[in-house]
Image (cartoon, helix red, strand yellow):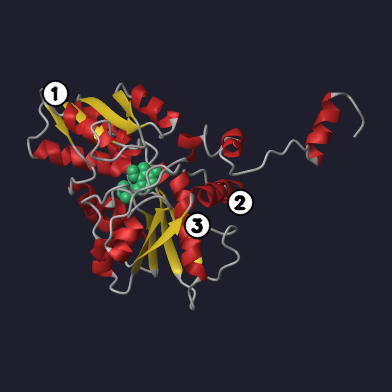
Amino acid sequence: MEKFNKNIIDIIGNTPIVKLNKICNNIKSKLYVKLEYLNPGGSIKDRMGVYICKRAQEKGEIKPGGIIIESTSGNTGVGIAIFSAINGYKCIFVMADKQSKEKINNLRAYGAKVIVCPTNVEPEDPKSYYSVAAKLAKLPNSIYLDQYSNLDNSECHYKQTGPEIFKQTEGKFDTLVASIGTGGTISGCSKYLKSKMPKLKTIAVDCEGSIITDYFKSKKMIKAKSYLLEGIGEDFIPKNINFKYIDDFEMVNDKDSFLMTRKMLRKEGIYAGGSCGATVLGAINYAKKLKKPEKILIILPDSGNRYASKLYNDNWMIDNGFIKKNNKKDSLDIQIDKILNNEKI
Ligand SMILES: Cc1ncc(COP(=O)(O)O)c(C=O)c1O
């Protein structure tokens, strides 16, 4: 029995890389996606959630039976919840109300307490999910991990995800494309990969409404606007973003990102979250501007089943004006109806 994994944390990582074939057939560059939804908790944040907990434990910041508090769009919470299940900690997650019900229910299923805060308030507002999480750290025997400014976040990707990508690819690609939220994934991976591949270019994908791209380009802080994509973009500049390791940004919007995410499932069989479609779209837009085709590696952070009630739900897409209502039956519907009504086809 020794050959088996000792617990679920052991199987985090070593996610596969798959070539995209159909959704990018209008560009010459080759696109490869790293499927982070195949982590046991369903996202790239399994790696980081567990890592920041382990680091806090090593630093003596979490005591036996303690409470771990985190502000999360959902995925980091799962990594922390897995760690806590195994190590006997309690969890409190503070989330913005725009996050999907699936994510909130998923965290409650782990036994965590989930506090939902309004999305459209400034980060400094006492009602924001960041402020509420910081306030809860007054609870005895508790720690607020704070993935935004806790540099163990990007360190995790520098020490684990970056080296894993290098090993899997032998460094044989030209450009890394990743979405940006806390900045941990892109900053950590890029820092490691650029140390091994001096010619590597790193492109961050941000969404309309976020302030990060503007800050990168003009060093000015604009006012954030609301958007529906989850996990990507920010209304402040988290400490985990290290602009030194980012060469450029691609900006995408909600609608095109959701449509691309759905297309990826229908054409490639890849059931991924909205920020994944955003990242692939950003990579395609980047590739369209290239003079010479490249090999592009794209990190896909999480799973589609977190968004079944949203971007994969036609009614939600219609209500948000992203697709048009279509009551027309296709030829297969018509044949099905006939067979079920005992009519000739
Ligand atoms: C679904 C999703 N996509 C993208 C990101 C961005 O990753 P990072 O925070 O490492 O920049 C996150 C972060 O929470 C996420 O949950």
Q: Residue furthest left?
A: 60
Note whether 141 is above or below 213 in the view shown. above
Q: Which residue is mark 3?
A: 281
The residue drawn where x is 33% and y is 24% is 110
The residue drawn where x is 59% and y is 42% is 321
Whichever of callouts 2 and 3 sits on the residue coming sooner in the sequence is: 2
Distance from disc 2 to disc 1, alpha carbons, whole Å, reads 49 Å
- Is label 1 within 8 A of ligand 1 (CB to nearest ligand atom)? no
User: Are circles 3 and 1 on residues that touch, CB within 8 Å?
Assistant: no
The residue drawn where x is 60% and y is 64% is 25
Closer to the camera in the image, 200 or 309: 309
Looking at numbered disc 3 in the image, what kind of residue is underneath it? Leu
Looking at numbered disc 1 in the image, what kind of residue is underneath it? Leu
Assign a secondary structure to mark 3.
helix
In the shown orientation, is residue 134 left or right of residue 278?
left
Assign a secondary structure to mark 1.
loop
In the shown orientation, is residue 79 left or right of residue 21?
left
Residue 183 in percent (x, y) is at 29, 52
Note whether 35 is above or below 115 in the view shown. below
Residue 153 in percent (x, y) is at 22, 47
Q: Quadrant of residue 47?
A: top left
Q: Is residue 86 visible?
A: yes
In the shown orientation, is residue 37 left or right of residue 190?
right
How many marks the image carries: the answer is 3
- Is label 2 within 8 A of ligand 1 (CB to nearest ligand atom)? no
Q: Residue furthest bottom?
A: 291
Q: Tell which tag, 2 or 3, sits nearer the viewer.
A: 3
In the rendered structure, find residue 139 and report the number of the disc placed on it.
Answer: 1
Q: Is residue 246 visible?
A: no
